Amino acid sequence: MRDDRLERLMGFGVTVRDHLMIAHSLRGDVFGPAQRLHGATYVVDATFRADELDEHGVVVDIGWAADELREIVGALSYRNLDDEPDLEGVNTTTERLCQIIGDRLAARVSGFGGSRLTGIAVTLHESHIAWASYEVSL
Amino acid sequence: MRDDRLERLMGFGVTVRDHLMIAHSLRGDVFGPAQRLHGATYVVDATFRADELDEHGVVVDIGWAADELREIVGALSYRNLDDEPDLEGVNTTTERLCQIIGDRLAARVSGFGGSRLTGIAVTLHESHIAWASYEVSL
Amino acid sequence: MRDDRLERLMGFGVTVRDHLMIAHSLRGDVFGPAQRLHGATYVVDATFRADELDEHGVVVDIGWAADELREIVGALSYRNLDDEPDLEGVNTTTERLCQIIGDRLAARVSGFGGSRLTGIAVTLHESHIAWASYEVSL
Amino acid sequence: MRDDRLERLMGFGVTVRDHLMIAHSLRGDVFGPAQRLHGATYVVDATFRADELDEHGVVVDIGWAADELREIVGALSYRNLDDEPDLEGVNTTTERLCQIIGDRLAARVSGFGGSRLTGIAVTLHESHIAWASYEVSL
Amino acid sequence: MRDDRLERLMGFGVTVRDHLMIAHSLRGDVFGPAQRLHGATYVVDATFRADELDEHGVVVDIGWAADELREIVGALSYRNLDDEPDLEGVNTTTERLCQIIGDRLAARVSGFGGSRLTGIAVTLHESHIAWASYEVSL
Amino acid sequence: MRDDRLERLMGFGVTVRDHLMIAHSLRGDVFGPAQRLHGATYVVDATFRADELDEHGVVVDIGWAADELREIVGALSYRNLDDEPDLEGVNTTTERLCQIIGDRLAARVSGFGGSRLTGIAVTLHESHIAWASYEVSL
């Protein structure tokens, strides 16, 4: 019965939720009416993964995790992403925003308990019927 | 024990959910960063009220209700509300959008079973931590 | 600023959630494909209202409330409502099922703290995008 | 068709969500195992009501509303309510905590746009299957 | 710190939600009262996975994904699954329905961007307290 | 296009939800105000995984799964975890409680269909904005 497959999934995760509200437009016929300038609330779930808990019994200080996510999300909030210099030429789809937020979190992790964390997952809910996610290993 | 108060609340409601995604900006210092062009997903709940059910045992044909809401919401979707001629001079706060959608539903109700309906309530969820609502009697 | 209107809404509510899974069909062209035998999970929220809390600081013993709801819901669960003698000739719409469950709860209340309760509300969620409710005063 | 009843419910609401995590015990046989020291996360929804929107198109500055709720909730958070001097002799049921938070919000409202607000409702979710609420007119 | 394990999970997902309402009965003593004809609403989440985004920055055209899911779900909706020729001899448990929907989605994917997709996951929520899922690689 | 990676994730899961309400305190400066005696409601999701369904078409008897989870959760409910002999010296963080519940479920699985199950995942939601999870292979 023992199976290599799931052993790889063993371990812990801790998730914090925040949100951002932005305007943007998407380029490409595939997007139909979403090619027009519109906007979205993204409810953001950021998960931090580790194989083992630290000496306090946590994956990561959840207060730190929430603050880091808040800072990354805050830098994107209440903006028209079409005008952000950082995102020039980027089609800011829900998937791509997951990746941007996930990679920014990953970059910060190296400065805080990063050596123990094994991965980060980010999910952006764009409505009650659609969401996207991105998972990166560390 | 019998109490006039709640008798007034007796009756039925049926609710359908839809959503819209828009860009807009809000005018007034009170809005802080939301004065910048940004956007939102609004998850919209529209409730139809009646004292009694009709001969089929419903408040209203739920298919009709969903279609009407879809049409009203669709006319606002994937747009920059700052540029909508209909909304010129309107501060499109969540509360105001509740009212606009609620009043548009109320206007349509008169053409469909309206004589039996007693009220309409509209709730717009702008995130997992904030929502607004508007209730209108018929 | 004081206003009669809301004074009538003052007071307390306590809500318990349960669910039932049934088969049924609906009679009437208005129901379209739901005229065929199909089924539903209804997530049921039952709210008990009172103007004042009792000597323990509650609207109603929440354990009792949950048990009463469980019993009423259990009597309908895992059944084809088209074949239930109790429901013969009843179009078992979501609205009507709210009323049936609400009235059965109201009947039981008289045997348990009923003299203090002022109303009961029942909401049945039939999916993530549709629900109905019924409110009865006591 | 026009009906006095629902006219009384006309108007607007805006809701903000927060949460608190506390320890407490409840006095009275009716509470069964909840007489032991245990605890709860309460997800708190505070609704502010008004008949009309202000000149900015809102019920209340949502930032102010969230801050006020945060302050009230923060004063109760991460505590054993059995040891709080303010709550001595109070059975801190979910219903009673709704009232305490609602009344504290109502007291603050008088200092901020209170003259326009008509009511406050507070809901505390104690789990995915139980919640309580309290509504107070202003 | 780098770890092979999670690298395998890297990548993107996009999910769309729909629902179906069916009647059925389950065969086997293990199902207790669910052996009787009853029914369910299943809220269906279908996730499409890819290692990389396409040239538009998406996993898959979300409109296409929603339409495909709608078509598969629609073919099962408002029916008594006990009478469906396609499902003859199949115990239509929540798990099995996940698999049926997941495999039907997988079959369609080959005709639409299939060469880039790496997996499909389907979750069916049968109530607020129970759900099942199925994951298939492509 | 075929990819070893996701093949490892193929298979089924079934999840049941329950909850527990506890008091506790956390040791370590990192926990800030949560070092004080406080409490939490944890909404618990327990997922059972299998590569194949059994002869009835299920991962596991969902009634058994719910009962086992109920028993494990019940043994922790309405208690001050700081005083539990079983948990002496344990920092009862959300992550650690996931592990404790997950390992207790895994121990019981061996007596019930365990030879087919491949893994167990447990998620504890401590609020609407934070949760933790633990996954163990069998």
Image: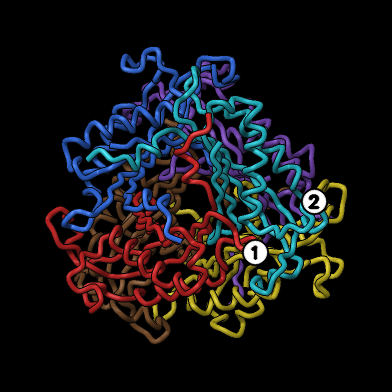
Chain colours: A red, B brown, C purple, D yellow, E blue, F cyan
Q: Amino acid at mark 1?
A: Glu
Is residue E127 toward the left or the right of residue D124 in the image? left
* Category of crowding for the residue at label 2, using alpha-carbon neighbours closer than 10 angstroms: few (below 14), some (14–19), many (at least 20): many
Q: Give the residue pinned by disc 1.
A: A55
Quarter occupied by residue D68: bottom right
Q: Position of residue E25 (x, y in %)?
A: 48, 18
Q: Secondary structure at mark 2?
A: helix
Q: Which mark is residue C6?
A: none
Say which of marks 1 and 2 sits in front. 1
Q: Position of residue D36 (x, y in %)?
A: 83, 53
Label 1 in the same subunit as label 2: no
Q: Secondary structure at mark 1?
A: loop
- The image shows residue A70, relative to residue F12, as above or below, that is below
Is residue F112 toward the left or the right of residue C43 in the image? right
Q: Specify the subunit that label 1 lies on.
A: A
Residue at (61% x, 28% y) in the render: F63
Residue at (36% x, 44% y) in the render: E17
Residue at (13% x, 58% y) in the render: A28
- The image shows residue F22, relative to residue C134, as above or below, that is below
- The image shows residue F88, relative to residue C24, as above or below, that is below
Q: Nearer the viewer, residue F29 or A54?
A: A54
Residue E64 appears in the picture as rendered? yes
Q: Specify the subunit that label 2 lies on.
A: D
Q: Position of residue F40 (x, y in %)?
A: 68, 58
Is residue A71 toward the left or the right of residue D132 in the image? left
* Category of crowding for the residue at label 1, using alpha-carbon neighbours closer than 10 angstroms: few (below 14), some (14–19), many (at least 20): few
Q: Give the residue pinned by disc 2.
A: D34
Q: CA distance from mark 1 to mark 2?
A: 32 Å
Is residue E9 toward the left or the right of residue E105 in the image? right
Q: Is there a contact, CB below 8 Å, between mark 1 and mark 2?
A: no
Quarter occupied by residue C101: top right
Residue B4 appears in the picture as rendered? no
